[in-house]
């Protein structure tokens, strides 16, 4: 059974690109466009890894992350922050921070190292 990656980003171009990249490399995907929607999707889909944008409408990625870490099971999901914001913001346990624009091969390498 393929591993599932959840893409959380408000930019539909980034979401589409990441979905295609991950699916072309054998992963299943699910998506959310903000932190509010993301919590519903993560509870339903139980992804193996999450890519998380920080700056989004309705609820920022850092707030979603704080909610996620309150659940004993969900907090175990590895998170890769993919953001246009400089620095590392409020997601202290992320396995990686990648700044937009990003290198697809670097991202895939991190994903493969994290979940195979």
Image (tube, rainbow, N blue to C red):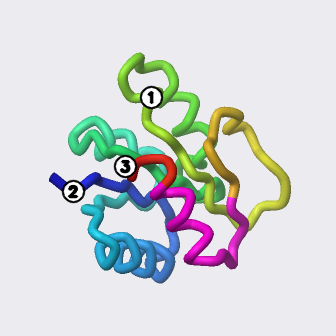
Distance Cα–Cα, label 3 vs label 2 = 23 Å
Q: In the picture shown, does residue 114 fall above or below 75?
A: below
Reading the image, the residue beneath label 1 is: 76
**Residue 65, horizontal then vertical, whole percent:** 55, 36
Reading the image, the residue beneath label 3 is: 37
Say if mark 3 contacts mark 2, CB within 8 Å.
no
Residue shown at 37% from the left, 55% from the top: 6
Q: Give the number of the disc on residue 42.
A: none
Secondary structure type for disc 2: loop
Q: In the picture shown, does residue 60 fall above or below 109?
A: above
Q: Which residues are magenta?
A: 98-112
Residue shown at 62% from the left, 69% from the top: 106
Q: Give the number of the disc on residue 2.
A: 2
**Front-most of 58 and 90?**
90
Magenta residue check for 109: yes
- Return the residue found at the far right: 87
């Amino acid at each position: 059974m393929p591993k599932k990656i959840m893409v959380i980003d408000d930019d539909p171009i980034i979401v589409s690109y990441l979905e295609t990249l991950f699916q072309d490399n054998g992963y299943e995907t699910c998506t959310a466009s903000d932190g509010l929607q993301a919590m519903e999707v993560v509870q339903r889909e139980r992804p193996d890894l999450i890519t998380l944008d920080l700056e989004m409408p309705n609820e920022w990625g850092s707030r979603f992350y704080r909610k996620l870490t309150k659940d004993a099971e969900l907090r175990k999901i590895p998170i890769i922050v993919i953001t246009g914001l400089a620095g590392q913001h409020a997601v202290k346990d992320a396995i990686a921070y990648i700044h937009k624009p990003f290198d697809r091969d670097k991202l895939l390498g991190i994903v493969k190292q994290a979940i195979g």
